[in-house]
Image (cartoon, grey):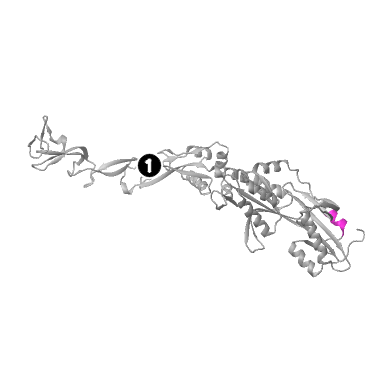
Amino acid sequence: MVKDNNTSEPVEILPAITEDERAMKLVLEILAGKIIDIKPELDFSSELGFTYPLVEQTLGITGKETVSILESLVDKGILKKNFFDRFLHCPQCQSLNLRPTTHCPKCSSGNIAHGRILEHFVCGYVGLEDEFVAEGRYVCPKCNTELRVIGSDYQSRGLMRKCHDCSEVFQIPLIKWRCLKCSSLTAEDKVTEQNIYSYSFNEARRGWLEFELKPKPQLIEFLKQRGYEVVENATQRGRSGAEHSIDILATRDDGVITHNIAIGVKAAGDEVSLRDIFDFDDKAYDIGIHEKVLVVVPGLDKEAKTFASQQRIKVLGVRDLETVLASAVPPRDVEVEKEPFEFKSKSQMVAYLKRRGYEVKKAAAVRGRSGAEHNIDILATRDDGIVTHHIAIAIEVSDEPVELGRVFDFDDKAYDIGIQEKVFIASPGLSQEARQFVERQRIRVFEVKELDPSD
């Protein structure tokens, strides 16, 4: 799911596009700049009476299919539509090839004439000027009286119309439409009106589409090749009880620990803001995911960059992501353990991690953010290209169950170093207080009765 800052509403649009090869092809042509403006052209021979030549030539479709695809892309916010014209349809055959005709409002006859209307005061006859003209004089066609003085014998009522069938004189005629395809005659209020639109690309979607159509599928394949299970638009319930949606959730169970990567996608017309980054970080925190990657289109504003750095969110632009994917070293084959991991010895743990692709250091000395130097029994590091996983592993051996203080000390060291993935191996086990603490701090624990003495 992607939030578009221009609409403030989440949109899920790519699945519908990718399922329709024609819509996908049109979007790709637009992104490539091969199609700019999509304008209709009048064509009486076509199904609708108009066509979109560029789209129809590109996709090999006509008529309603064309309009359906264009409108679907408008619904998904990829195209914008603008009023182009209003056409009239014949209600009988749907043709746009109509001609207006004028009629008498009294008897509906089309046998009407337009001209100057004269009225004879004596007999009251009203007619066209041509009816009164006789040998260069005005003579009333009804009573044969010569009209000499305007205003006294007669008056001019101006330009009007007269029906030759019922003699009605009127100013505004009745309009009807004659279909030149089926010859039917339709009253003006019975003719079907249809708005026709032109279409243009919504530039605010460009960066997001460029990510969705190429880098995103590549990213998903990249993660799968490295052993991750990938779920798009994953829904997870947080510790608060709220349900959150993550654009891409990548999960890899290494036996020793399960890595979860929350990958968010934020698109904006200008720059992605602090509010959007905070929203993503807040969801990841509530779910309990430490590894966070954010793909931003087109980029972050200053405040958002600072916050992302502080929260250890890896931020990638579309071009950055393409570079990472192109330059990534192909994953080397690693042995996949099908059985749950059981700790038996330190050397067995080291060998297991190495088979899983980790670089392993024993008795690693690491300087923390406080400046203090800490010793970690086993430090395992694996660079997956997108994120680098660090696992801090502590091994505590005691005659009695390991107390809270030992576990707290390990958790404090890991926090200072900045390592979120923690494994604690306790022999012969943990005290009740320590067990409650590791659950709260999400520390993976292996309790063993005794360790291999060879270690």
Could you say which quadrant of the image residue 245 lies in? bottom right
Depth order, front residue of 451/291: 291
Q: Which image quarter holds the C terminus? A: bottom right
Q: Is residue 115 magenta?
A: no
Residue pictured at 75% horizontal, 48% vertical: 384
Q: Residue furthest top?
A: 136
- Region rendered in magenta: 345-352
Could you say where residue 173 lies in the image, as x and y percent from the top left? 25, 43
Where residue 165 appears, as percent x and y from the top left, is 18, 43
Q: Is residue 185 left or right of residue 299?
A: left
Relative to 233, residue 81 above or below: above
What type is the residue that disc 1 sits on?
Leu
> In the displayed image of the protein, which residue is found farthest to the front?
371
347 drawn magenta: yes
Q: Is residue 30 left or right of residue 359?
A: left
Q: Is residue 318 above or below residue 277?
A: above
Q: How many marks?
A: 1
User: Residue 283 location in percent, x, y?
Assistant: 65, 57
Q: Nearer the viewer, residue 300 or 302?
A: 302
User: Which SS class for mark 1?
Assistant: loop
Most common SS among magenta residues: helix
Q: Is residue 455 left or right of residue 33?
A: right
**Residue 327 figure quarter:** top right
Q: Which residue is mark 1?
A: 96
The residue lying furthest to the bottom in this view is 432
